[in-house]
Amino acid sequence: MPFQNNRWLDVQKVAMDWVVDQPKNAEAWYYLGASFQHLGDMANAIQNYKKALSFHQLHPASLSALALIAQSQGDSVALSKIKSQVKGISHEALEGLNDILSANQSPVNH
């Protein structure tokens, strides 16, 4: 329940124990990445999401998280690469990612 309750330090501890116990588990690496991301450590978040992808090349949650980070950092090259990977899953997956990215864009106030 720590993930659902935004208890990111608890998520991080559980995920760290999980990756030690199951070092090739993509879900464990994803949750570790998510904890770092929500605690504001984007470098470690990216590293852990990429580690998840090393075990599950098309891990949807890791790809989505990396896409959101790339979008927030204005990294169009990384975002394009991720979209290409997601398109390899299916066109529906790409549409879903585009919906997530669109919803994440904050409106510009003048």
Image: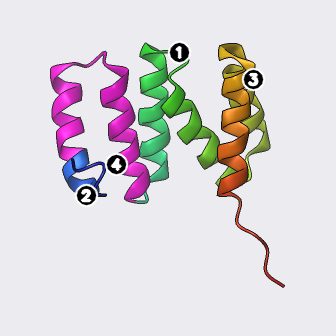
Q: Chief secondary structure of the magenta span? A: helix
Which residue is depicted at the point 43% across and 25% down?
Answer: 51
> Which range of residues does the magenta coloring cover?
12-39
Q: Residues within 10 Å of mark 1 (few under 14, many from 20)?
A: some
Q: Quadrant location of residue 63?
A: top right
In the image, 9 versus 92, the foreground residue is 92
Residue underneath mark 3: 84
Q: CA distance from mark 1 to mark 2?
A: 28 Å
Q: Answer whether labels 1 and 4 touch (C-beta < 8 Å).
A: no
Which residue is depicted at the point 50% across and 40% down?
Answer: 46
Among the two numbered marks 4 and 3 on one chain, the one whose residue lies closer to the N terminus: 4
Q: Quadrant location of residue 80?
A: top right
Secondary structure beneath dot 3 equals helix
Q: Residues within 10 Å of mark 4 (few under 14, many from 20)?
A: many
Among the two numbered marks 1 and 2 on one chain, the one whose residue lies closer to the N terminus: 2
Q: CA distance from mark 3 to mark 2?
A: 33 Å
Among the two numbered marks 1 and 4 on one chain, the one whose residue lies closer to the N terminus: 4
Q: Answer whether labels 4 and 3 touch (C-beta < 8 Å).
A: no
Amino acid type of disc 4?
Ser
Among the two numbered marks 3 and 2 on one chain, the one whose residue lies closer to the N terminus: 2
Q: CA distance from mark 4 to mark 3?
A: 26 Å
Residue underneath mark 1: 57
Q: Answer whether labels 3 and 2 touch (C-beta < 8 Å).
A: no
Amino acid type of disc 1?
Gln
Residue underneath mark 2: 7
